[in-house]
Image (tube, rainbow, N blue to C red):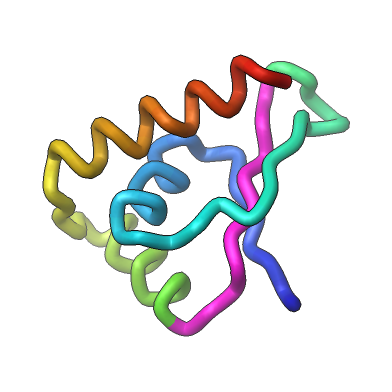
């Protein structure tokens, strides 16, 4: 299974808000202040990634909850 990796918290939150599951997460080996989030590589992920950088909209409550969930994950590392 291929995976997409990002350390951009807001991109990860956007993907999660649209229902993509975080399949793994870990500290970045180059910069321990960063966390890498892993998502399954799918055509939908690619579409959402493009939408994110082109002003895509998301339900704000879903986005806020996704960011909170991701931050919670990072505190456990």
- The residue lying at 60 percent from left, 73 percent from top is 41
Q: Residue 17 location in percent, x, y?
A: 30, 50
Q: Is residue 68 above or below residue 47?
A: above
For the C terminus, the quadrant is top right
- The residue lying at 56 percent from left, 52 percent from top is 22
Q: Magenta residues: mostly which secondary structure? A: strand
For the N terminus, the quadrant is bottom right
- The residue lying at 46 percent from left, 74 percent from top is 46
Q: 13 left or right of 26?
A: left
Q: Nearer the viewer, residue 68 or 32?
A: 68
- The residues colored magenta run 34-43
Q: Residue 32 location in percent, x, y?
A: 78, 20
Q: Residue 60 location in percent, x, y?
A: 13, 39
Asked if residue 54 lies in the magenta stretch, the reply is no
Q: Is residue 10 above or below residue 52?
A: above
Q: 9 left or right of 73?
A: left
Direction bottom: furthest residue: 43
Q: Residue 10 location in percent, x, y?
A: 39, 38
Asked if residue 36 lies in the magenta stretch, the reply is yes
Q: Is residue 13 above or below residue 18?
A: above
Location of residue 25 by image quarter: top right
């Amino acid at each position: 299974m291929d995976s997409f990796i990002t350390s951009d918290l807001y991109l990860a939150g956007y993907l999660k808000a649209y229902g993509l599951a975080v399949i793994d997460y870990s500290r970045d080996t180059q910069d321990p202040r960063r966390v890498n989030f892993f998502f399954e590589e799918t055509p939908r992920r690619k579409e959402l990634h493009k939408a994110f950088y082109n002003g895509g909209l998301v339900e704000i409550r879903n986005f806020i909850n996704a960011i909170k969930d991701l931050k919670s994950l990072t505190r456990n590392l």
